[in-house]
Amino acid sequence: MGKLDNGINFGELDLEDDRNRLPLNPHLLRASNASSFADAEDREYIRADTNHVRSFNKPQRKCRFKFSLCNILLCDSDLTPAYSSSPEARRELADLIRDACVNVGFFYVSNHTIPEQVINTAIDAAKRFFALSTEEKMRLDIHATTNYKGYTALLAENTDPNNAGDLHEGFDIGPEGSSDPVKMDAPMAGGNVWPPDEIIPGFKKDVLKYYESALNLGRTLSPLFALALDLEEDFFTDKTRNSAAILRLLHYPPQEAKPADKVIGIGAHTDYECFTLLYQDASGGLQVQNADGRWIDAVPIPGTIVVNLGDQFARWTNDTFKSTPHRAINSSGSERYSIPLFFGTDYEVLLEPIRTCVSETNPPKYPVVKAGDYVRSRLEATYQ
């Protein structure tokens, strides 16, 4: 049983008493439309507190309030128990993560082991790269490569077919070198492209250091996802030895809060891989679509990484885990920088439904496909 900061036990709440309602925590998120929470009869309460978050899917008694059941829950999970020798501690954390994965597909993690200095130097590297001339950056044009690595110019992507382009520029890398036993015709296989060190000193070193730190975080989360699915903790280990992890440095120029011409930072989309580890700066702009179709601001929380699930996990878990649409609109008035790492499986892994996610009443929903083939099809659609 969890407690809120006011000392109220979840299980002791009188849900028919408005005085004991679960508080809306502005530190975690805020509704993109403030009127969403104006009327008590319609109100969806955030079931989260930055220090105490527990499953609350079963109210103790019938209530007149509409609970979100995590459809707008973004919880802050302290990853410290992930490193514990206690199976019970790891299990408790996995249960918390499962609640977020099943109901919304987004959560924050703190104590994530990516050093602050590594983050800061990577962001500084991104700023120095995007400050280069367009001519210099276009020498690394992603469209000139066969493995989707390099520079993407403003409006060169359009993730939402209903829009006219994405107002961001990016720089993509994958596993460094070609020594990994990965098929060379797989998407992202092969070497990265880098600007010359004399043009931007230390760029490669700083970006790769962040890449390795984020990759290690992904490997830390994988056993927790396995436990959340009632699998052995090492279930994903032999399937992510050469994880198809793609890292992007992203730069979003500022724009109006209600942009015209169907151009926003990045249009509504779901991610391709198993899960994404996102560092976002203080500018904000990330929005998550809840079950009612409303856009909720996933505000930056210092010291955290945002985790969101992708389509590979949704297919693999037969939609037990949610791959939730999200977008970004940089209306902060300043430049926005973020670094997502897309953590996927080895290319040859078959995305066939996990045994704990299918039953006679819940048969497989998707045809079996190789992970690499799935990612390739999505990348080709993005960069056409």
Image (cartoon, rainbow, N blue to C red):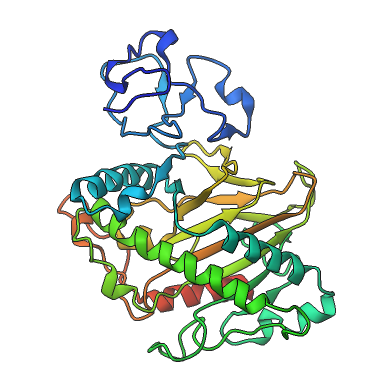
Q: Looking at the picture, does residue 112 appear above or below residue 172? A: above
Relative to 244, 194 lies left or right? right
Question: Which residue occupies 29% across, 48% down?
Answer: 94
Question: Which residue occupies 57% across, 25% down?
Answer: 36
Count of numbered circles on the image: 0
Q: Looking at the picture, does residue 157 appear above or below residue 189? A: above
Q: In which quarter of the image is the C terminus?
A: bottom right
Q: Quadrant of residue 195?
A: bottom right
Relative to 193, 214 lies left or right? left
Residue 298 visible in the current orientation: yes
Rendering coords of residue 150 (x, y %): 65, 79
Rendering coords of residue 40 (x, y %): 50, 14
Q: In which quarter of the image is residue 31?
A: top right
- Name the residue nearer the viewer: 242 or 167: 242
Q: Looking at the picture, does residue 234 appear above or below residue 93? A: below
Relative to 254, 287 lies left or right? left
Relative to 380, 14 lies left or right? left
Q: Looking at the picture, does residue 1 appear above or below residue 125? A: above
Rendering coords of residue 288 (x, y %): 54, 44
Question: Which residue occupies 40% across, 12% down?
Answer: 20
Residue 150 visible in the current orientation: no
Q: In which quarter of the image is residue 95?
A: top left
Rendering coords of residue 204 (x, y %): 63, 78
Q: Quadrant of the N terminus?
A: top left
- Name the residue nearer the viewer: 132 or 39: 132
